Amino acid sequence: MSEPSLREVQRLMRSAIRPAGGLAGAGTAEAILNPQRGVPGAERLTVYAGGYLARTCEALEEVYDAVHHVVGEQAFAALARAYVQRHPSHDYNLSLVGRHLPEFLAVDPLSQRLPFLPDLARLERLVCQAFHAFDEPPVDPARLARYSLDEWEHARLTFQPSVGLIASPWPILDIWTARTQPRESVSIDLVDRPQRVLVFRHGLQTRCELVDEWQYRLLEGLLAGRALGTVCGELAGLAGSGPLPLADWCARWASRGLIHNLEV
């Protein structure tokens, strides 16, 4: 038998380690790997498969701590196994392994019983992204005071990469906040309690804050790259918006370093 190529060995290792792959080349493994202390090579490869799954589950739990807290240890372990079979990792960074979990949860049977889970996972994904984001130098707040009202109308704000936004019909921020409490002590009213959450990093701390409907709509438009005047004009046409405290909101965003740049 000829010596296997490096590519063949790599494919063998991948088939053994990936949960969905199984040990497709068990016979080949016996031919390639020498037994160690009486343990066949194919059997020793299963150690790597178990380690891959265990480490991936740990990475998912680290990012989706609240989802893990809500569903419990056994259900989360089953969820993680099903997820990695559907979405095996192709990244060097384990924090990225769960990037598809919110969409996966949307069709998972768990969400039939706990329909807020996909949105809770989206919030936790934003928190993870904010933590790992490389923010740029913030705009000088004094610079904002130099623009005229006409210039503000055409202004486009660029926010820091750590800034994220999510709206949900469920109280996802309350559920996320309760992730550190014992499960038996958590009691959250889920009925008719929508929440809109602004996620950002301030210094080394990642924060989540509730915003009202109008600040959410404004931020949503600005984060999409639209001009301030355009977004405000759309909001003015909606019943119940009333005068918006734009100056206060912008000043608060700037003071926290959330605005990277402003273009007129």
Image (cartoon, rainbow, N blue to C red):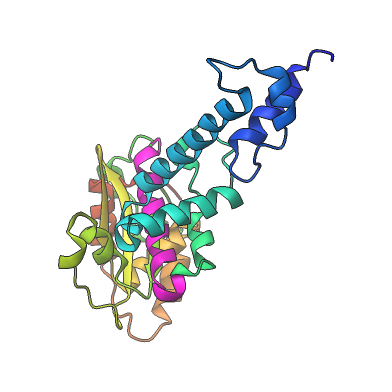
- Give the image location of residue 48, x and y in percent: 53, 30
Q: Is residue 249 magenta?
A: no
Q: What range is drawn magenta here?
A: 111-134
Residue at coordinates 49% horizontally, 37% vertically from top-left?
Answer: 50
Residue at the outermost bottom position:
239
- Give the image location of residue 55, x and y in percent: 43, 37
**Can see residue 181?**
yes
Residue at the outermost front position:
38
Residue at coordinates 23% horizontally, 78% vertically from top-left?
Answer: 189
Q: Is residue 110 left or right of residue 240?
A: right
**Can see residue 156?**
no
Q: Is 14 or 236 nearer to us in this picture? A: 14
**On screen, 54 above or below 173?**
above
**On screen, 202 above or below 31?**
below
Q: Quadrant of residue 111?
A: bottom left
**On screen, 2 above or below 91?**
above
**On screen, 197 above or below 254?**
below
- Give the image location of residue 179, x and y in percent: 24, 57
Residue at coordinates 37% horizontally, 56% vertically from top-left?
Answer: 74
